[in-house]
Image (cartoon, rainbow, N blue to C red):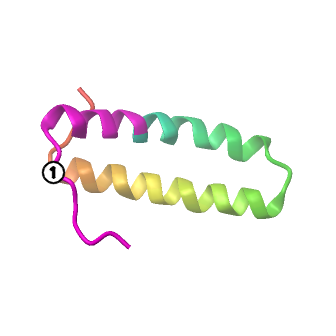
């Protein structure tokens, strides 16, 4: 478990948001392609976490541009 959080500048937060948004776009395709139920469930959980993170960052005013 993390004991401290890193301090990030605006460009670093934008990069994180870009990476999360790219993952958000790619996960549905990967979910549709997978045949393993267990892997599909893991991907769905990941998708949910990514969506939650994106929303939380947007609520803090962080954008990808």
On the image, the x and y values in percent for residue 33 come to 78, 41
Q: Nearer the viewer, residue 2 or 24?
A: 2
On the image, the x and y values in percent for residue 25 come to 52, 35
Within the image, what quadrant is residue 20 found in? top left
Structural crowding at the residue carrying mark 1, measured as other residues with C-alpha within 10 Å and reported as few (<14), some (14–19) or many (≥20): few
What's the residue at 60%, 43% (across, down)? Answer: 27
What's the residue at 17%, 45% (across, down)? Answer: 8
| Residue at numbered disc 1 | 7
Image quadrant where one finds the C terminus: top left
Residue 25 colored in magenta in the image = no
Q: Which residues are magenta?
A: 1-19
On the image, the x and y values in percent for residue 24 come to 49, 42
What's the residue at 69%, 41% (across, down)? Answer: 30
Report helix, strand or loop for mark 1. loop
Reply above or below: 36 against 21.
below
What's the residue at 55%, 57% (across, down)? Answer: 46
In the rendered image, the residue lying farthest to the front is: 3
Reply above or below: 41 against 58.
below
Residue 8 colored in magenta in the image = yes
Describe residue 63's horizontal placement relative to residue 26 as left or right. left
Describe residue 48's horizontal placement relative to residue 29 as left or right. left
Reply above or below: 9 against 38.
above
Describe residue 57's horizontal placement relative to residue 1 as left or right. left
Q: Nearer the viewer, residue 39 or 11?
A: 11
Q: Nearer the viewer, residue 33 or 19?
A: 19
Image quadrant where one finds the N terminus: bottom left
């Amino acid at each position: 478990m993390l004991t401290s959080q890193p301090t990030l500048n605006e460009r670093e937060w934008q990069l994180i948001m870009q990476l999360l948004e790219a993952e958000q776009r790619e996960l549905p395709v990967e979910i549709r392609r997978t045949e393993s139920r267990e892997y599909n469930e893991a991907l769905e959980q990941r998708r949910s976490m990514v969506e939650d993170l994106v929303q939380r960052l947007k609520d803090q005013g962080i954008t990808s541009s």
